[in-house]
Amino acid sequence: MNADRMMAYLKAKGLSYLLPALSGNGHMFETVIDKLKEGASAKALENVKSQDPEKRQKVADSMGMFFEMVKRNLPRLSTNTQRKLAFNMFFNHLTLGQEARDRYRGKYGEPPPFLLVISPSMRCNLNCFGCYAWEYNKSKELTREEVSEVIRQAKEELGIYFITISGGEPTIWPHLFEILEEHNDVFFQIYTHGMMIDDVMAKKMGELGNVHPAISIEGGPKETNERRGEQAYDKILASMDRLNREGVLFGFSVTHTRKNHHAVTSDEFIEEMLKHGPSFGWFFQYVPTGKKPDPSLVPTPAQRLERYAAVERFRRTKPILVYDFWNDGEATEGCLAWGRKYLHVTASGMVEPCVFIHMALDSIREKSLVEILNSPCFKEARSMQPFNEDHRRPCCIIDNCDVLPYLCRKYTLVPTHDGAERIVTDLHEALARNAEAYRQELERQDAGASVHPAG
C-alpha cells in the first residue's frame, strides 16, 4: 500500500469511528458532515462536462442533498451502518474506486459507469399488474460465484462500489446475504417488495451495515393493495418499522402511473412515509414493457411535469431525499444507460443497457464487463449522448424515441424475453406520440415562465 493510499485508509478508518461517536453532538457532527460535503461536491464537479453555471449547480445540489440526508439520518442508524457508510464511501469509493476509474479512463478515454444493477433471479411471489420484469424466464438464475465475479470485476476494473440488486424479488434468491457479507466493502441497494423482511432479516441488515433496501409502494392503501395484493400496504409499513428500529438506512420506491398520480405526488403520501423512517425515495415512471404492456398507464405529459414539481417541492419542504429516475436528467447531464452511468446484468447473464430496455447482445458468461462496455453498440450509444440538449428529456425509450429502434436495427439486439421487442415495434408509435406531447408541454411551460417570471 503506497503512502497516499495508506493515509486515505487511516482517515477513512478514523472517520468510521469518529462519526458514530459524534452523532450525538449536534454542532460538531454537523461541522464534520458539512466539511465532507464540500470535498465530495468539488470532486463531483470535476467530472461535469458542462461549464454552464446552472447545470453545474444542479450536480452540486444533488451531492449536497445526499449529505443533508446523511446529516439528518446518521444518528439514528446502527453503529455498523454508520461505519460502513463512512469507510465504504471515503476509502473504497473515493480512493480505491478512483484509482480504478483513473486507470480505466486512461485506457479507454472515458469514465466508467458508477453503478451496476444485478438481477440474480427473476422469481417473485407477487403478481403485480404492469410489472416490467414479469416476462423474464423465472427458471434462469445467476450462481453465487457468477454474481461474486461480476462484483469483483466492477470493483477492480471499473471502480464501482455501488451495486443495486434487483429482480424479481431479491430476498427470494438464496445467496443474497452471502454476497452482502462477502462484499462488505460495497454499498448495496436492494429493490424489494419488502414483505419478506421479518424481524430476523431486519436485524441482519442492521448488523451488516452495507445494505439499503428500497421498498416498493404505490401510494396509499387503495393503490398499493390493488397492485400488490391484499394487506400489502400494512405489511410494507410493518417492514419499514422493523428496519427503522434496527437502524437500517432504507427508502421507498414508487412506480408513477396515470392511475396513482394524485396519491404519489401528494404531501400526504410523503408525510405518511416519514412516519415509518425511510431516508430516501425513488420515483420511476411506468414504461409499457413486461407484463401486458399498457400505454394507457403511462403518465400524461402534464402528470409528468406535476411529478417534477412535486419532487422539487418534497426536497425543499420535507426531511427526505427523493430522486426521479427520468426527471433528474439535468443533474446527471442526460441518460444514465448504455454504460454511461450504469448497466444491468440479468438473471440469464445477458447485459442490458438499462433495466427498462430488455434487449441485449452480450453475456457475462462469454465476455467481461469491460469488453461489454466497449462493444460497438454500447460505444455508439454513449457517443450519441446526451440524446438532445434539453436534459429534462434524457431517455432513449420515452423521450428520444428514434434512438432505440436505430440501435436495435443496426446491431440486431436480441430481446431478453418474449415480447420485449414490442417497445420498438407496435408500442413505439404510442411512445413517440407521448414524447412529442411532453416536448410541447415543456415548451409551453417555458414560454409561460418567460412571460410570467417567478417572484
Image (spheres, grey):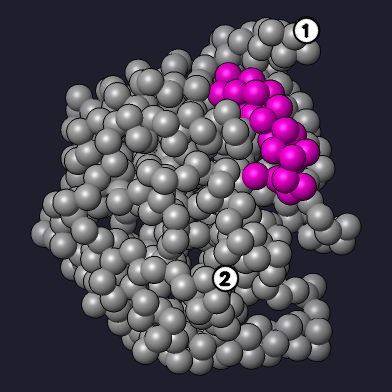
Residue ID at (36%, 21%): 181
Q: Is residue 358 left or right of residue 417?
A: right
Q: Is residue 20 left or right of residue 176?
A: right
The relative height of residue 83 versus residue 418 in the rendered view (above or below) is: above
Q: Which quadrant is the N terminus positioned in?
A: top right
Region of the chain picked out in magenta, as a range: 87-112
Residue 202 location, quadrant: top left
Which disc is residue 395 wearing?
A: 2
Q: Where is residue 433 in the image (x, y as percent from the top left)?
A: 50, 92
Q: Distance between the residues labelled 1 and 2?
A: 43 Å
Residue ID at (43%, 90%): 430
The magenta stretch spans residue 251: no
The relative height of residue 53 versus residue 261 in the rendered view (above or below) is: above
Residue 251 location, quadrant: top left
State the residue position of label 1: 3
The relative height of residue 202 versus residue 29 in the rendered view (above or below) is: below
Q: Is residue 446 left or right of residue 359?
A: right
Asked whether the viewer can see residue 65, the reply is no
Which disc is residue 111 wearing?
A: none
Q: Which quadrant is the C terminus positioned in?
A: bottom right
